[in-house]
Amino acid sequence: MSTLTTVLIIAAVVAVLVVAGVVFRARTGTGSGTRSLKRRFGPEYDRTLARHGGDTEAAHHDLRERVERHGHIRPLPLEPAVREQYDAQWTTLQERFVDAPRQAVADAEQLLARIAATRGFPAADRHDEQLAALSVHHPRQVEGLRTVRRTAHSGTASTEELREALLHARALFERLTAAESVRGGKARPHEASAHGRGHLLKPKGSGV
């Protein structure tokens, strides 16, 4: 066997080992794959890992599968008039919280799901798919929808828990209704009235 042939064989073996190592790291969640997913998903990464009982490989498979299914979505812009309608509806449900906190939280759940569908995410009746898609595009705010959904359907949630759920959900509402900047097409929060979003939710008799 010539020296050249030997060198070529060794080079081929090394190349195979390198490729195998990259695939192994991607599948087992080691190396840059973990860092990349953590950077992309933030708190959603930790939540997914906990949901899979600390199984890194299962959590990474879950997150990558979501990206494959929903990463192609390009959220549709909102017309200014539609955005104003959503702002008004959010203001109304916040005001309704004073007299009917549970109903206000239920309304927030429905409104967020409806806005998400309007922006091009899965329809409101496809709860799990809509949450999965939102977790890809709004991983730091998607928990707000989960929280209002869980709290709205809880028969034991206190008024304070309902209040916190609605405040938590507001971050996702603001992301979903953000105006698109002219440069780069990046989302930029639009002006919000202090009455519509900035005020604290204070049920009657709360003394808060």
Image: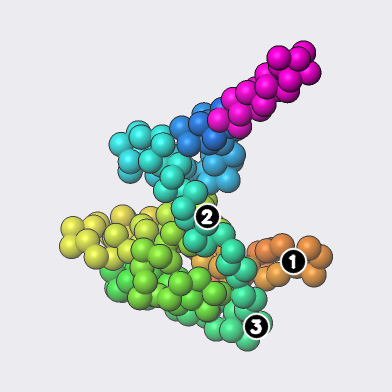
Q: Nearer the viewer, mark 2 or mark 3?
A: 2
Mark 2–mark 1 distance (CA, rounded to whole Å): 21 Å
The range drawn in magenta is 1-20
Whole-percent x, y for residue 152 in the image: 28, 65
- Residue 4 among those drawn in magenta: yes
> Mark 3 = which residue?
79
Kindly identify which residue carries mark 2.
Answer: 67
* 48 or 179, nearer to the observer: 48
Q: Position of residue 29 (x, y in %)?
A: 49, 33
CA neighbours of label 3 inside 10 A, class few (<14), some (14 to 19), many (20+): few
- Name which residue lies at 65% across and 83% down: 79
Give the distance between the C-alpha atoms of the residues marked 3 and 1, in whole angstroms: 15 Å
Of residue 157 and residue 153, the one placed in the foreground of this image is 153
Q: Residue at x 31, y 55 (%)?
A: 161
Overall secondary structure of the magenta section = helix
Q: Position of residue 162 (x, y in %)?
A: 32, 60
Which residue bears the numbered disc 1?
A: 185
Q: Amino acid at mark 3?
A: Glu
Find numbered disc 2 in the image and state the secondary structure of the residue it sits on.
helix
Please identify, in this view, whether the residue under mark 3 or under mark 1 is nearer the observer: 1
Q: Is residue 48 above or below residue 16?
A: below
Q: Determine if residue 104 is in view.
A: no
> In which quarter of the view is residue 191 placed?
bottom right
